[in-house]
Amino acid sequence: MSGNLQVGPFRSAHGSITLPGSKSISNRALLLAALSEGQTTLKGLLDADDTQVMRQALRTLGLTVVDYPDSTCVINGCRGRFPVMKADLFMGNAGTAIRPLTAALAMQGGVYRLSGVARMHERPIRDLVDGLRQIGADIAYELQEGYPPIRIGASKIRVNTVVKVRGDVSSQFLTALLMALPLVAEEPVHIQVVGELISRPYIDITLKMMGRFGVIVACPDSQSFVIPSRAADCSYQSPGQLLVEGDASSASYFLAAGAIGGGPVRVLGVGRNSIQGDVAFADALALMGANVEVGEDWVEVAGVRNTNGRLNGITLDCTKIPDAAMTLAVLALFAEGETRLNGIASWRVKETDRIAAMGRELRKLGAMVEEGSDYISVKAPVKQQDWRSPPEGVDTYDDHRMAMCFSLAAFGPNPLIINDPNCVAKTFPNYFSELAKIAA
């Protein structure tokens, strides 16, 4: 992908946006539907690079996956056993696809290879592989120890003890084990998280989705999970039809626009009933002084209630909202005082090193930035004339969230060039045309 796009300067934002489906829910739903007994119709499914990667992988594994108009997809489940026992799968840069699929494939007794783009081969998978090796999985690294590409050999999985997994690098490792272990649970399976569990709301999404497909996981405490035995008739069953709610991470850009562009801007598809942790971005916006209203399946933001008309800087633990926290870093350009975002170590192992990338690009615009291993602190340019519009543009690092976040900087005094805007295809292919509908 290449090219660039000039955006702004925007003076106002108002209108409503219907969100694309949640990436996190979409890829979990696709895999669970594939592993279930029966046919599942998914409505509101995200149609973007990451979900296409998952769909194509499932087709390569022998499943019937049919796409229909209006974001509908029908999957015929395989009752936990993929028809194809030997396959080479390309997973792009989709962490929500490669991690859970690796675990599910390790349960199959087949031979598989999983690879991706160059950045995927820099994203860690060791903690998941270590967890799977505990129960007999045969997994080898092809290039660098601890990273894809990986090869899965035929092996007999035996769960004789508590399965342990680290939770401090990515919650996707635990999600992968939770979704895969019901396939081999001859007895109840106990999973123990070692150390801190980051991004807990994403685990809650996993547990709720598994419940929709008939497997209820017990949580004796915050670090322990018990998967019921298959003998108790707890295997994945299709719910028939499932509606994917809107993407709460994607909602953050439009809600932010409603704050700095006066609003009102309403996003449709998430609200107080959302199962996604990133819906808490609305709470962070309210802390910064925005006027926020939340309905059952919508959130609306209408400007700022602070007397100076600006947002106020905040210090926030973002462990539970790592993706939406990126939007707060750019909103700091419009805030009085310092904005410090803590608990974001996971940014460093995402589509790019997001702490470093965010710091570099914010400085280009005139912000004062301090960064550490797990935090970033941002102060806005002091005066209007201190804002800069870098002639070389804002780099996006093939990271969809960098492109979407920095589009908000165009609500400042200058037009902005976004490099490689097409990287938004990973989760929100028509983002910039949707933004154009509300921003003026």
Image (spheres, rainbow, N blue to C red):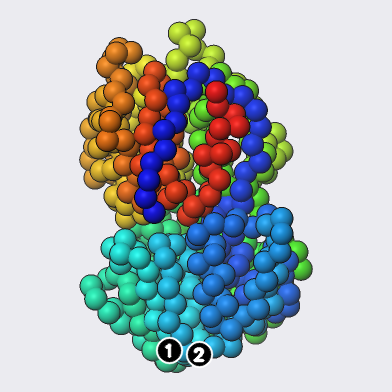
Q: Farthest residue toward the top?
A: 307
Question: Tag count in the figure?
Answer: 2
Looking at the figure, which quarter contains the N terminus?
Answer: bottom left
In terms of depth relative to the viewer, which is nearer, 65 or 223? 65
Work out whether residue 85 can be spotted. Answer: yes
Q: Position of residue 14 (x, y in %)?
A: 61, 24
In the image, farthest residue toward the right: 240
Question: Residue 111, which numbered label?
Answer: 1
x and y percentages locating residue 146 in the rendered image: 27, 71
Q: In the picture shown, does residue 343 fall above or below 213?
A: above
Please tell me which residue is depicted at 30% across the width and 82% down the height of the picture.
140
Name the image quarter holding the C terminus: top right
Query: Looking at the picture, does residue 363 appear above or below residue 27?
Result: above
Q: Residues within 10 Å of mark 2 (few under 14, many from 20)?
A: some
Q: How far apart are marks 1 and 2 (CA)?
A: 6 Å
Residue 91, x across and y down, in percent: 43, 69
Which amino acid type is shown beneath numbered disc 1?
Val
> Marks 1 and 2: CB-CB under 8 Å?
yes
Type of the residue with mark 2: Met
Does residue 343 show up?
Answer: no
Judging by the rendered image, the residue that carries numbered circle 2 is 85
Which residue lies at the image location 55% right of the left edge and 27% below the top edge?
439
In the rendered structure, the answer to whether residue 237 lies left or right of residue 119 reads right
Residue at x 31%, y 61% (from the top left corner):
119
The spot of residue 370 in percent (x, y) is 23, 32
Q: SS of the residue at dot 1?
A: strand
